[in-house]
Amino acid sequence: MPSSRTVIDIDGLATVFPHQVARLSALVALGISAPSVYRRCQPGGRWRTLFPGVLLLSSNPPTRAQLVQGALCLAGPDAMVSGHDALHLHGAHTTEAGGQLHLLVPHGRQLRSGKTLIVERTRRMPQPVLRKGFLTAPVSRALLDTLRAMRHPMAMRTLLRETVLRYHLNPADLLCELSLGSARGSAFPRRLLAELTDPRAVEFSPRRVVQLSGVPKPRWNVSVRDEGGDMIGWADAWWDDVGMAWRVVENSLAGLTGPELTRTGVVVVRTAKSHLLGDAAEVAEELRRAYARAVRRPRPRVVAA
C-alpha cells in the first residue's frame, strides 16, 4: 500500500494496465479510494465501467479488444475467450463478430451471462492458446462454439467450410468433439459435419439448398400456365406468392427452359446440376437474391398447376 506521502499519477494509470482496463480491486490496492474511482466513472467522467468491478481508464467508447480484456478480467485467470472473437484472434474470417462476447469458464464458477456477455460453464475446458495477448480457445473449439450460436444456415456452412480448409481441421474429429459437448444449438452443425465426413454427401439436393437459402418453402414440380390456360413452362420449384421459378438442368449449356416464363415476367433461376456439387452455399445465395428481386416487382399473371 503506498504511504500517505506517495503521489499517484491517476491519469497515467492507463499506461500501466493492458488495453487501459483494470479491476476495481487493483486500483484500490494501489491506494485509490473506491469513492474516487466511482466519481471518475460518473457520466462525463474520465473513466467508464465495462463490467461489474471492471473499469476502462478512458472516457472513449471501448474497442473490441478492450471489451475482451474486460470480460477476461471479470471472469478470472482461468477463463478464455471463444466464439467469433476467438476465431478473429486466430485470424479466421467471420462476418458476425461484434455481438455478445463468448467466454468459457470452469463449471463451478458462479458467473452469469449478461447483455454483452455469454458465459458458458463447462467441465470440458480446452487447453487455451495465447493470441494477441488473450487466452483463447483452440480454433476447433472456437469454431464449434460459434456454429452453435449462429442461426443462418448458409453463413454456418460457409464458415465451417472455410475454417476447415484453412486450418486443416478433421471434420470427423470436430463431429466427435461436438457430440461430447453441450447439445444446445448442435443439431444443424452436426448435420453439416456429417456431410463433410461422407464424400458421397457433397451433392446437395434442391430441397436442402432451399432450406439453406432461408427463402420460404416452394411448391415442387409444377407446370405454369398463362391466363388463357396454355402451358408456358415447368418449374422444379415454384414460389407462387411472388411468381418465381427454379429449374435444375443437366448442365450450363442446356437450352433455356420455358423462355415464355421469362417473357411473362416470371423470375427464373437456372442451376446446372454440377453447380450443386460443393457450391450449395453459392446457389442458395443466388436463390435468396432472386427471391428478393421477385418480391420487389408486381407478380406476373400466371397460374401454377
Image: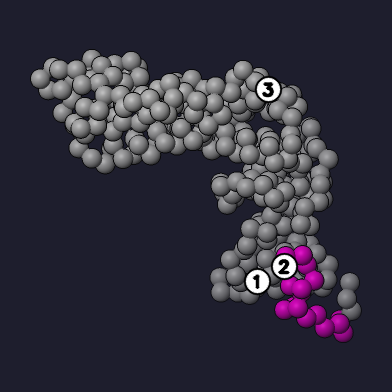
Residue that appears at 87% across and 84% down:
5
Label 3 close to label 2 by CB (< 8 Å): no
The stretch in magenta equals 4-19
Pick out the residue farthest to the left. 228
Q: Which numbered marker is on residue 197?
A: 3
Residue 130 in the figure: left or right of residue 174? right
Viewer-nearest residue: 186 or 253: 253
Residue that appears at 59% across and 49% down:
97
What amino acid is labelled 3 in the image?
A: Thr
- Crowding at dot 3, Cα within 10 Å, few <14 / some 14-19 / many 20+, comes out as some
What amino acid is labelled 1 in the image?
A: Ser
Q: Which numbered marker is on residue 20?
A: 2
**Disc 3, SS:** helix
Magenta highlight on residue 114: no
Report the Cα–Cα distance between label 1 and label 3.
Answer: 49 Å
Residue that appears at 63% across and 75% down:
46
Viewer-nearest residue: 202 or 24: 202
Label 2 close to label 1 by CB (< 8 Å): yes
Residue 114 in the figure: left or right of residue 276? right
Viewer-nearest residue: 161 or 29: 161
In this figure, which residue is indicated by the disc labeled 1?
58
Report the Cα–Cα distance between label 2 and label 1.
Answer: 7 Å
**Disc 1, SS:** loop
What amino acid is labelled 2 in the image?
A: Gln
**Disc 2, SS:** helix
